[in-house]
Amino acid sequence: MINVAGYAFPENRASIVCTHVWRGSPVLLFAHDSDGDIQFYCGEESHSMSDALVLGLAEIRDHLRSMEDIPIVRPGYYAERATVGGAWNLQKMDD
């Protein structure tokens, strides 16, 4: 099990990671969909489908050091911050 955002997920749990984060940009937006899916983004708004990777949590655990400080994010919510070390802002997702 891997702990992320206050929840324990199986190591083989698929997640969406933007290519910018995968290449080293910090996680500035974390989403926990109401269906349980989790997503890690750099915070840029101009993402397209080609900017998304589907990876297992075990695959990204060591690569995404910036996911360690993500706050507790309930399903149906997302957390966003402006900079690394900045305060997280929790918001409910639009249905």
Image (cartoon, rainbow, N blue to C red):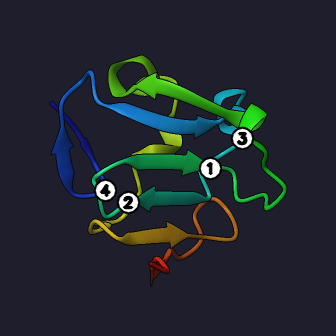
Give the left or right position of residue 40, taking residue 76 as reference. Answer: right
Vertical arrangement, residue 29 with respect to residue 61, above or below: below
Q: Which mark is residue 17?
A: none
Under circle 3, the secondary element is loop
User: Which label number is shown at residue 33?
Assistant: 2
Q: Using a 10 Å C-alpha cutoff, classify the residue at mark 3 as few (fewer than 14 neighbours), some (14 to 19) or many (20 or more).
A: some
Quadrant of image for the C terminus: bottom left
- Of circles 1 and 4, the one toward us is 1
State the separation of the CA atoms marked 1 and 4. Answer: 14 Å
Q: Tell me the number on the disc at residue 5.
A: 4
Q: Position of residue 29 (x, y in %)?
A: 58, 60
Q: Secondary structure at mark 2?
A: loop
Q: Which mark is residue 41?
A: 1
| Between discs 2 and 3, the one toward the N terminus | 3
Identify the amino acid type marked 1: Tyr
**15 with respect to 36 (left or right):** right
Distance between the alpha carbons at the discs numbered 2 and 3: 22 Å
Q: Amino acid at mark 2?
A: Asp
Q: Where's residue 79, x and y in %?
A: 48, 69
**Contact? badges 2 and 1 (CB < 8 Å):** no
At a point 45% along the width and 45% down the height, the residue shown is: 67
Q: Secondary structure at mark 1?
A: strand
Q: Which residue is mark 3?
A: 25
In three-dimensional space, the C-alpha distance between marks 3 and 4, rounded to whole angstroms, equals 19 Å
Image coordinates for residue 92, horizontal then vertical, percent: 42, 82
Amino acid type of the residue tagged 4 in the rendering: Ala
Q: Nearer the viewer, mark 2 or mark 3?
A: 2
Alpha-carbon distance for marks 4 and 2? 12 Å
For marks 3 and 4 on the same chain, the one whose residue lies earlier in the sequence: 4
User: Which kind of residue does numbered mark 3 sit on?
Assistant: Ser
Q: Earlier in the sequence, mark 1 or mark 4?
A: 4
